[in-house]
Image: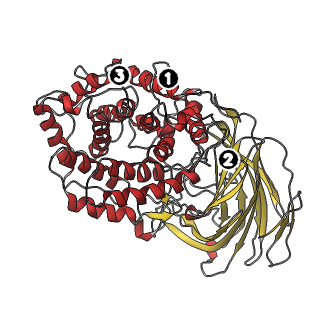
Amino acid sequence: MTPTGWTRQHLADLADESLLALRPWATPDHARFDLPGPAGQSGPVSDGLEAFARSFLAVGFRLSTAESDPHDHAGWYARGLAAGTDPDSPERWPSLVDVPQARVEAAAISIALHETRRWIWDRLPAAVQGRVVDWLAGSIGAWYPESNWQWFHNVTQAFLRSVGGPHDQARTDEFLAYLDGCYLGDGWYSDGRPDGRGGNIDWYAGFVMQLFSVWYCRMSAGEPGIVERQALYAERLQAYVASAAGLFGADGAPLYQGRSLVYRHAVVGALWAGAVFDANPLPPGRLRHTCLGAIKYFVERGAYDKDGLLSLGWLDRFEPMRQPYSGPGGPYWASLGFAGLLLPETHPVWTEPEEVAPIEGVRAIRPTGWLVAGTEADGIVRVINHGVDHSTATPGLESPLYNRFGYSTVTAPVPLTDGSAGQAVDNQVALVDAAGRWSQRPLINLVAINNNRAESRHIARFARTSGGSDAGPELECVSVVRGPIEIRAVRLTGTAHLQPDREAGGLVVSGFGVPREAAEGARGDLVSAVVSFTAGGVIGRSVHELETAFGAEIEVPWCRFDGPEVGRWYVVGSYLGVAAPDWPTVVVSGTGRPSVAWPDGVSDEI
């Protein structure tokens, strides 16, 4: 693990280069950037607004504390604001009333306007200011789902309020109460609480739930109670930074889990916010290393294409990973990664020596049900998941980006919901029924988590071809983690859901999937392996002829037990690293809980 060598000037230069690369794609009056690539579900006009709004967010961070604007970013975007809010302009933006996606982009514009007030807002003609207010006021009474979107409403209202425009404080207060109810503790938010569940956890905990909460306070200075609210949010942000900073590999790669990963270095926005709002628990030089390390990781692996545009992908362009809502302007949510530019050159984050972040060790993130295991020897960070399922109380299909047992900074899940015909997908515990169906775990119930051990239960569910699913047996799953190895113990707890057509003919436990053909910029030295510690386990490998952001021909190791018995423990070791694993010794005695003796003499009870 080496220092990035980057400074504040590197970040400022990257912001300028990214913004300048967009200009050839602008409409004549700069209200949209009509970028190449597949349209999002809201259509190309909304996509053009998206590219404008999200890149404008980078302008906000770039100019907030700047003493000069040599590229006239302010003038360029001011012209776009005037055209986009002009109802008679051919470049007019979609109404917030008519196009829900515009409500997201309005929030980005609101923050950018707040941060560039002396550069743009204060210099806009009164007529243009009025049109901007009218456009943003479309947020009043508009639908915002019970999710991170309510922060988009709130920051838009905060800006309207700050310029004397119409706003709905009662609804803002209602949304503040709901969003507070999404807080799970230790710095982590669930993105909404469908049916009271808190498993909707991904990088949105930082993208929006953390960063927008403190920015709402920044935009609400002087309002009653805002000092106390900001103190509360800063306390939560500090805990999040301490936790999320451990989800980056030695090469700067963030954990690959959850949706909207095309936003790339947006993942460090909340970490920068920790320093901006005096809520950084890390040494300043270490925070800089983590944030700039992630940005540099993407820059050096082709995130910006030959034209200097952010592509839809992770390393370089890989459109299959995008969500339907993401158009070609979607990746510019990465502008959140420029939030560090609010910190002046004299801030300790920039003046103190860069400090390489340690990753060695295993720790628990209790609200998420995650065990986080980092190893300096290979630079990989892994997450073993016993709590995140992105589901409601009504089970749906399993999501590869949320429900798997393991995620890492160097692999992506196989993008299939389950296995079939002997082809296991990665990081699952699956029953195979009499019809050959492979079970899923759409609902995960965390039982316990502490240090290097996590335990959960789930009902194995078998998807029907006609839709919906059938309930099978309940499975108890325990993971004990040390270094690059997870010991995964599984047992069927009872027969309550066993029916003749769903009787478990086999139990399959799988490990990480690694590409045989690594993508450019991805790791090509990875080893994934499993071993059985229970008699009767058969080891095999499946190769999926498909691609992920990290490469093609995804190979998944697995272990299968035929005719699993109720109450018996089945124990499998799973490894992800770069060399042959040094497996522990596991003692399994009947229905008693297994014990693990690690090579260094440490022991664990499952």
* Label 1 neighbour load within 10 Å: few <14, some 14-19, many 20+: few
Q: Secondary structure at mark 3?
A: loop
From the viewer's side, name the closer residue of 124 and 248. Answer: 124
Q: CA distance from mark 1 to mark 3?
A: 28 Å
> Dot 2 corresponds to which residue?
381
Q: Is residue 304 above or below residue 478?
A: above
Confirm whether residue 455 shows in the render. no
> Dot 1 corresponds to which residue?
305
Q: CA distance from mark 2 to mark 3?
A: 40 Å
Q: Position of residue 505 (x, y in %)?
A: 71, 68
Residue plotted at (41% across, 70% down): 195
Residue plotted at (69% across, 42% down): 514
Q: Secondary structure at mark 2?
A: strand
Q: Position of residue 366 (x, y in %)?
A: 59, 64
Please tell me which of labels 2 and 1 falls first in the chain.
1
- Which three-letter amino acid code belongs to the residue tagged 1? Asp
Please tell me which of labels 2 and 3 falls first in the chain.
3
Q: Position of residue 390 (x, y in %)?
A: 49, 59
Q: Are marks 2 and 1 in contact (CB under 8 Å)?
A: no
Q: Are marks 2 and 3 in contact (CB under 8 Å)?
A: no
Q: Is residue 366 above or below residue 553?
A: below
Q: Secondary structure at mark 1?
A: loop
Frontmost of labels 2 and 3 is 3
Residue plotted at (38% across, 20% down): 20
> Dot 3 corresponds to which residue?
68
* Label 3 neighbour load within 10 Å: few <14, some 14-19, many 20+: few
Horizontal side of 22 relative to 252 (left or right) equals left
Q: Is residue 337 above or below residue 388?
A: above
Residue plotted at (32% across, 23% down): 73
- Which three-letter amino acid code belongs to the residue tagged 3? Ser
Q: Position of residue 422 (x, y in %)?
A: 70, 54
Horizontal side of 186 relative to 17 (left or right) equals right
